[in-house]
Amino acid sequence: MDVITSPSIISGSVSAPPSKSSMLRAVAAGLLADGTTVISNPSFCDDSVAVMRVAECLGAGIENDQGNVIIKGGLNPVCSELDCGESGLGVRMFAPIAALGNSKLTITGRGSLLSRPMNMISDSLIPMGVDLSLNGDRLPVTLKGPLKGGLAYIDGSVSSQLLTGLLMALPLADNDSRLIINSLASRSYIDLTIDVLNNFGIEIINKSYSEFFIPSGQLYRPTAFHVEGDWSGAAFFAVLGAIAGRVNIHGISRLSTQPDRRIIEVVKMAGATVNESDREITITPGKLKSFDFDISESPDLAPPVAILAALCSGKSYIRGTSRLKVKESDRGEALTKELSILGVKVINNSDHIIIEGSASFRGGVVSSHGDHRIAMAMGIAGLMADDPITINDGEVVNKSFPGFYDELTRLGAQVEFVN
């Protein structure tokens, strides 16, 4: 489905979506906890639904009860194939978890996930006793445990997602484990993982992010878990508040460990006014100026930050962009192509992007590249364009934020859906 967003007057309040990152980790923990876990404020985006199905295949009982997700845990595989949809975290997190048992299981996915490298899974799990094969360095991965624990060396420069899976699985291994980490990316996502694990009674010893010690023989404790608001989704509305009109975002915590909370730093650097409280933020436009910002620890911020830069006077530098190649799309190239269509001058280098700002966007037809965050970026661009912007496959936002266009409409945006 195509989506058209048109020049609009923006003002009002929106709700941050539930954090997909928090939800996926809580579902995995609920699977591993013998007993009943209650997840409040759950996410039902495409990635969350896919991960819940995987958890069910691994033995969890899951139901929706008056808006809460109820998980009856217990690792006991009932399927031979685990389909993670398009969730990269789902694949990398569940590979170590699936390897805890001695059943032969195949993990696969869909869409762009099938072209993303997965060799870090074999590099880490085989030394820990897992029988594993890949399709080259791509999905599907077929594995058979048990995961014994012990010593492993992890390259964290591309993604922290496999480390999350190991931190979740290894407390149940037979042996204590020691993980030596090289160049860990997105440390805040590991903080989030450890925070979720602590809620379920699991201890992880973090030695300055270069080494983790995981005692074996631990037990997950079922619990009541509340999914916090999602800074990755809220970032687009923070940018909208900076470029278009006063926006209040509630259901979001400034104390969160999510790395994308750094969007507040960026909009302040660009000249917007930000008022914060414990559970909400309000962003008001100011005189926008260029900025220099490093996204290496929060690469999902690239699309909204690029939209902000495109409307700031002068040249803005977005640094630390090398990891954008292995997202749902090559986001550096996708942003360069689509912003150029909208009349923005963009230079995409190997590790940084330079954007020369202008007063507004041209209208036109752009592609989402099958990437939910590119679609959201183009969606807010249309509200500040001279003419409407049509986003091909704009409904791909359902991957992480099914209510995105509803929230835009709530702020006064003109949004049209075209089959």
Image (cartoon, helix red, strand yellow):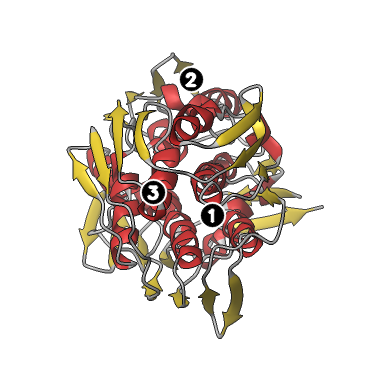
- Toward the right, the furthest residue is 419
Say which residue label 3 marks.
Answer: 170
Residue type, numbered disc 1: Ser
CB contact under 8 Å: marks 1 and 3: no
Q: Quadrant of residue 274?
A: bottom left
Residue type, numbered disc 3: Leu
Say which residue label 2 marks.
Answer: 345
Above or below, comparing residue 288 to residue 383 in the picture: above
CB contact under 8 Å: marks 3 and 2: no
- For disc 1, the neighbor class at 10 Å (few under 14, some 14 to 19, many from 20) is many
Q: Tell me the distance, in whole angstroms, between the alpha carbons under discs 3 and 2.
A: 48 Å
- Toward the bottom, the furthest residue is 66
**Which residue is more in the foreground, 274 or 89?**
89
Above or below, comparing residue 117 to residue 67 in the picture: above
- Residue drawn at x 42%, y 28% is 158
Say which residue label 1 marks.
Answer: 8
- Toward the left, the furthest residue is 208
Q: Position of residue 241 (x, y in %)?
A: 37, 53
Marker count (numbered): 3
Q: Nearer the viewer, mark 3 or mark 2?
A: 3
Residue type, numbered disc 2: Lys
Q: Nearer the viewer, mark 2 or mark 1?
A: 2
**Which residue is more in the foreground, 233 or 391?**
233
For mark 2, give the secondary structure: strand
Q: Position of residue 163 (x, y in %)?
A: 39, 40
